[in-house]
């Protein structure tokens, strides 16, 4: 992140915030200029790290609290544009539950969106999400993929499958289907 480079150069945290704000465009620029009050901007520029009890963490070398302006700015942006972080996981659940791949032409988009969203969840490796990934495919094709992934007893061991394993099986079954139909 550009903030780390500025901080490594020894620039003060308040200057780093100003430099970052100079790069804002579009909605972010309008938010910074029109939505945030000068008091809110000052709060961001003077933020310090706090412990679990909410007390400032003091740095004896600096003679003051440890600066935390950049993290505060990022958190404030996320809170304004995305909402409370606790709402993000519930929103991701809703998005994943409703995500479908209508045609195999949309598979790359489906795979990218699904894996990006599911990786935000703490239970991303659970069999539920891996099965959901396959169930989001077109119905008959999804059944074919499940048949391929089944062991001789007819059970799919989702615990030992990665999303990469599932994706490569989907691609190989798709290629096999194209060869069979001479597409």
Image (tube, helix red, strand yellow):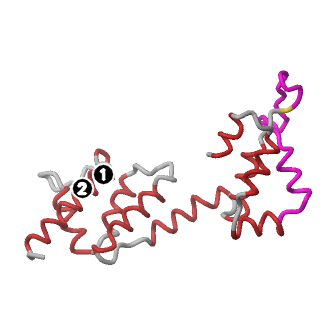
Which residue shows up at 25% across the image and 49% down it?
157
Which residue shows up at 65% across the image and 39% down it?
5
For residue 100, which quarter of the picture? bottom left
Residue designated by label 2 = 168
Mark 2 and mark 1 residues within 8 Å of each other at the beta carbon = yes
Magenta-colored stretch includes residue 99 = no
Magenta-colored stretch includes residue 59 = yes
Residue designated by label 1 = 164
For residue 26, which quarter of the picture? bottom right
Which residue shows up at 57% across the image and 65% down it?
91
Q: CA distance from mark 2 to mark 1?
A: 6 Å
Q: Does the magenta stretch mainly form a helix, a strand or a loop?
A: loop
For residue 174, which quarter of the picture? bottom left
Q: Position of residue 135 (x, y in %)?
A: 32, 67
Image position of 9 (left or right of 151): right
Q: Position of residue 173 (x, y in %)?
A: 17, 64
Quadrant location, the N terminus: top right
Q: Secondary structure at mark 2?
A: helix
Check the image and report above or below for 130 versus 2: below
Q: Position of residue 58 (x, y in %)?
A: 84, 28
Q: Position of residue 97 (x, y in %)?
A: 45, 68
Q: Secondary structure at mark 1?
A: helix
The magenta segment: 36-64
Q: Residue furthest top?
A: 61
């Amino acid at each position: 992140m550009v903030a780390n480079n500025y901080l490594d150069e020894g620039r003060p945290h308040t200057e780093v915030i100003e430099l970052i704000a100079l790069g804002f465009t579009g909605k972010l620029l309008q938010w910074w200029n029109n939505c945030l009050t000068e008091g809110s901007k000052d709060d961001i520029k003077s933020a310090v790290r706090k412990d679990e009890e909410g007390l400032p963490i003091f740095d004896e070398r600096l003679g003051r609290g440890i600066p935390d302006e950049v993290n505060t700015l990022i958190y404030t942006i996320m809170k304004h544009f995305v909402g409370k972080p606790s709402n993000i996981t519930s929103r991701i659940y809703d998005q994943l539950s409703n995500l479908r791949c209508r045609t195999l032409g949309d598979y790359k988009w489906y795979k990218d969106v699904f894996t990006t969203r599911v990786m935000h969840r703490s239970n991303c490796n659970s069999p539920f999400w891996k099965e959901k990934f396959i169930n989001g495919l077109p119905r008959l094709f999804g059944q074919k993929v499940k048949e391929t992934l089944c062991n001789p007893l007819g059970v799919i061991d989702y615990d030992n499958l990665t999303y990469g394993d599932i994706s490569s099986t989907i691609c190989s079954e798709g290629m096999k289907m194209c060869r069979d139909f001479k597409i």
